[in-house]
Amino acid sequence: MLSPAILSSSTRDDLDLGRHGIDNSGTVYYQLPPAAWIELALSRGEGTLAANGALVVSTGAHTGRAPKDRYIIAEPLSHNDIRWGPINRPMEPALFEHLLHRVLAYFQGRDLFVCDGSACADPELAMPVRVIADKAWHALFAQSLLRRGSPATEDVSSDGLTILCASGMHAAPVLDGTHSGTFIVLHLSRGVVLIGGTEYAGEIKKAVFSFLNYLLPLRGVFTMHCAANLGPSGDTALFFGLSGTGKTTLSADPQRRLIGDDEHGWSDTGIFNIEGGCYAKTIRLSCDGEPQIWNALRFGSVLENVVLDPHTRQPDYDDDRFTENTRAAYPLSHIDGAEPSGRGDPPRTILFLTCDAFGVLPPLSRLTPEQAMYHFLSGYTAKVAGTERGVRDPEATFSTCFAAPFLPLPPSRYAELLTERSRRHGSQVWLVNTGWIGGPFGRGQRIPLTHTRAMVRAILAGALDNVAFTPEPYFGLLTPEHCPDMPSELLRPHEYCTDRGAYESRTRHLAELFQANFETYHAPDVAEAVRQAGPRIGSG
């Protein structure tokens, strides 16, 4: 076991846990190197080592986010800005104080694990983030996902963000006003997040993102749930999409430099990564299909809920006995050729990734500005099994801006920023379906990754610049007549389907879902031209 003497007196002074209300804790382990965090986790029985050197942990009952247990404090400074509802559930300040007191009492006498890092690669926007956890591996996770070092310029918030992660503590719903024993509570004006009753580390990551999705747009910065990479000539591409649609996989391209795989900002000076690491899904991961991610999973990485061979300790990425939402966390430096600055110029190409479980949408479409706004506000995809608790099979869902669970502000705020930025810089927006073709989930086949990669590379290389596009008849989406290394018949699912009647029935049903969802957006928030950019068929 590491000695508490690893904390020097100057380090203890810098740590100053008293300002967080923490007193009389056990041993405090602070800002350790990855090897030391791993040693602690192993000695405490928090995980085991895989043959590739990664730390393998179990997150217990929670193998995904718990969206019904997320709250925002309803306090005067932020109250009028928040879009309150089933995603942003209000909690009264008095209940927050009560729950904070209980978290601090839980920390008393326990060993604590503290990681200091920052968010936002743009030095003008960099913000300090501190994670105080009751598990060593959560500190390793935070260190992998945050950017290293302290911000060099004035912070966007005087004290930054502090996350108190009490994974072993459970709320008492009757006393604490929570939905269950699990809680993720954001106090936006104080820059404090409380997490308890769950060991799923993704809650730490998304707490930072949610906080910045409130703070940065108020300063005119567009925050985005997307991946980003750079081409050999320095051209930037963005990949929007929910978990499981392919952001991490498609952005990790050996021919391009990865800026980041999930969370970015778009300021007046360009694109910047919010994070310092990646949090990739690993289900059915293969060396041939995703070599960059495969090679990144080594000592210093964390594998969540991945099954190991009991004799060889080799990870079995095909085994979903615990969850389909198996995950890997690793620093960006583990990706060969990653962009060290975490920054890029304004994007030339923007891709919306969707996983269509109905087998209706074309694999590739070029969007008009009005269609881009429509599909950004719609955020259609399918929830992938395991990403949220209780989801077993893919389900059609609409997640506005491809990020609804993490957006405190009204969607129109983010959509306006997308429109303004893309028009200013001439960004072309594309819709890429990474879901099913030739039939719905269960009858058709998922579009092969090789085909999707071929389409994305054709877009980025400009190979479609002189190709003719024709609108498909139902959604009005412009589809190319051909694409290099892609079977042309797959580009037009309305012609490829074997049962035209069944296809049209599914298409009508999906169109009605789009239209019903879009009814939540009212004028003047959405222009009539945008409303008319949706599907052309419906119940009538």
Image (cartoon, rainbow, N blue to C red):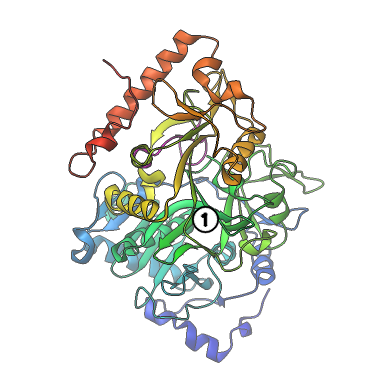
- Give yes or no for residue 414 being in the magenta stretch: no
Q: Residue furthest right?
A: 312
Residue 117 in the image: state x and y as whole percent. 51, 72
Q: Which residue occupies the foreground of this view, 156 or 366?
A: 366
Residue at the spot 32% in from the left edge and 19% down from the top edge: 537
Vertical placement of residue 507 versus 296, above or below:
above
Give the residue at x 59% y 20%: 489
Where residue 313 appears, x then y in whole percent?
A: 77, 49
The correct choice, above or below, for 457 with respect to 101 in the image is above
The residue lying furthest to the front in this view is: 466
Rendered image quadrant of residue 534: top left
**Residue 77's spot in the image, x, y percent?**
21, 66
Q: Is residue 224 above or below residue 112?
A: above
Crowdedness near tag 1: few (<14), some (14–19) or many (≥20) residues, C-alpha within 10 Å? many
**Which residue is most to the bottom?**
9
From the image, tell me which residue sits under label 1. Answer: 201
Q: What amino acid type is highlighted by mark number 1?
A: Ala
The secondary structure type at the circle numbered 1 is: loop
- Which image quadrant is residue 425 in? bottom left
Q: Is residue 37 left or right of residue 156?
A: right
Which quadrant is home to the N terminus?
bottom right
Q: Quadrant of the C terminus?
A: top left
Start and end of the magenta stretch? 376-393
Residue at (69, 51) in percent of width and height: 254
Residue 393 visible to an observer of this rendering:
no
Magenta stretch secondary structure, dominant: loop
Is 391 inside the magenta-drawn segment? yes
Residue under the point 47% across and 23% down: 360
User: Which quadrant would residue 191 be assigned to in this image?
Assistant: bottom left
